């Protein structure tokens, strides 16, 4: 494909050939001279558009305007045209380079502006039942750092890693001894043993230790028959430890993972209690309404007192 510069060179060479014929075609030579002057004028006008101010680095000023002297005459018409042709080509090359620089600068500027634009905030519709109670998934996977990490009933607990800002006091000798006194069963079902050990820690109100033990069980035995019990009990370990924000994701996950699970109904009711503790009446009412509709047998049976008590804590529309 012929570029603009190549087409201009071809036109100029044609003009040169016409002028080279000399007197044989004077009219053609005059026409070529007029067309060349027109091209030069257009290129100069384009240069002044791209480079306002008439900077001499990019194109010359009008002949004789600066120095008061005129350029020496060309020896022949052909030499004059070739010289002017080279000047026009040089001007076009400088214009092309400047346009490319401007294009690249504009692309970089556009990218920076796009990066600085605020990201849209996704809101959760209020009409969606219990999914609207959801908290960020990162809360569910937040690491738990209990005061002690017992590996077994006879292992010596290790202090939790100290944060860089401040080193909390480690567990007292009395607490260490009390945790070690809780034995871990050893049967032919290691999964059941791990869950039972976590339950015993929770029952003794060693909540941080119970949280870690139950997390280990959930990670290691996601398909165990006790998985619904474990997730629900882990949420209760957080809730009773005064950490309702950490408890809510586990209750919600246990309910949504298997609504027919052994403790799915319990988790939905405890989810309402977590929302009440957090002061979120709207989501608490959503969870209570969902519990009454999904688990009517529990609402009038085993969990009746807890359900009625929670309903009296909030005013729902």
Image (cartoon, helix red, strand yellow):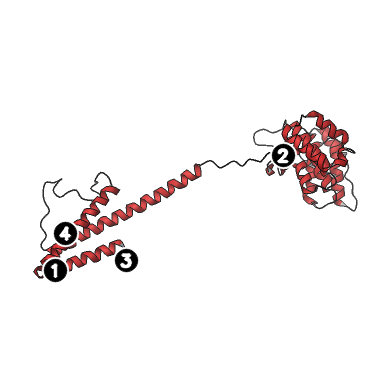
Quarter of the picture holding the C terminus: top right
Disc 4 crowd, CA 10 A, few/some/many (<14, 14-19, 20+): few
| Spatial CA span between label 2 and label 3 | 66 Å
| Spatial CA span between label 1 and label 2 | 89 Å
Residue 83: tell me if it is visible: yes
Mark nearer the viewer, 2 or 4: 4
Marks 1 and 3, the one that precedes in the sequence: 3
- Residue 246 placed where, x, y %? 73, 38
Instruction: Choose top left, top right, bottom left or bottom right for residue 133.
Output: top right
Label 2: state its secondary structure.
helix
Tell whether 56 sits left or right of 221. Answer: left
Marks 3 and 4, the one that precedes in the sequence: 3
Circle number at residue 133: 2
Tell whether 213 sits left or right of 5. Answer: right
Residue 243: tell me if it is visible: no
Label 3: state its secondary structure.
loop
Identify the residue under disc 3.
2
In-front residue for pair 99/42: 42
- Residue 199 placed where, x, y %? 86, 41
Identify the residue under disc 4.
34
Identify the residue under disc 1.
20
Marks 1 and 4, the one that precedes in the sequence: 1
Circles 1 and 4, Cβ within 8 Å, touching? The answer is: no
Label 4: state its secondary structure.
helix
């Amino acid at each position: 494909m012929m570029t603009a510069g190549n087409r201009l060179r071809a036109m100029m060479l044609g003009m040169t050939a016409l002028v080279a014929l000399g007197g044989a075609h004077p009219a053609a030579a005059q026409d070529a001279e007029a067309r060349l002057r027109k091209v030069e004028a257009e290129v100069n006008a384009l240069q002044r558009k791209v480079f306002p101010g008439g900077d001499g680095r990019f194109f010359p000023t009008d002949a004789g305007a600066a120095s008061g002297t005129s350029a020496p005459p060309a020896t022949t018409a052909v030499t004059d045209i070739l010289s002017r042709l080279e000047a026009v080509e040089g001007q076009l090359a400088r214009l092309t380079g400047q346009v490319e620089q401007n294009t690249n600068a504009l692309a970089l500027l556009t990218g920076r502006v796009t990066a600085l634009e605020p990201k849209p905030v996704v809101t959760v519709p209020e009409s969606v039942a219990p999914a609207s109670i959801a908290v960020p998934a990162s809360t569910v996977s937040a690491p738990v750092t209990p005061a002690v990490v017992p590996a077994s009933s006879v292992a010596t607990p290790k202090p939790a890693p100290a944060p860089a800002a401040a080193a909390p006091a480690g567990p007292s000798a009395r607490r260490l001894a009390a945790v070690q006194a809780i034995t871990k069963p050893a049967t032919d079902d290691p999964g059941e043993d791990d869950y039972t050990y976590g339950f015993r820690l929770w029952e003794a109100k060693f909540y941080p230790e119970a949280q870690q033990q139950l997390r280990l069980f959930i990670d290691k035995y996601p398909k165990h028959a006790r998985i619904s019990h474990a997730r629900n009990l882990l949420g209760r370990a957080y809730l009773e430890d005064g950490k309702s924000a950490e408890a809510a994701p586990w209750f919600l996950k246990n309910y949504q993972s298997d609504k027919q699970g052994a403790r799915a109904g319990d988790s939905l009711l405890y989810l309402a209690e977590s929302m009440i503790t957090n002061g979120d009446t709207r989501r608490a009412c959503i969870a209570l309404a969902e519990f009454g509709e999904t688990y009517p047998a529990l609402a009038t049976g085993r969990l009746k007192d807890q359900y009625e008590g929670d309903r009296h804590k909030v005013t729902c529309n």
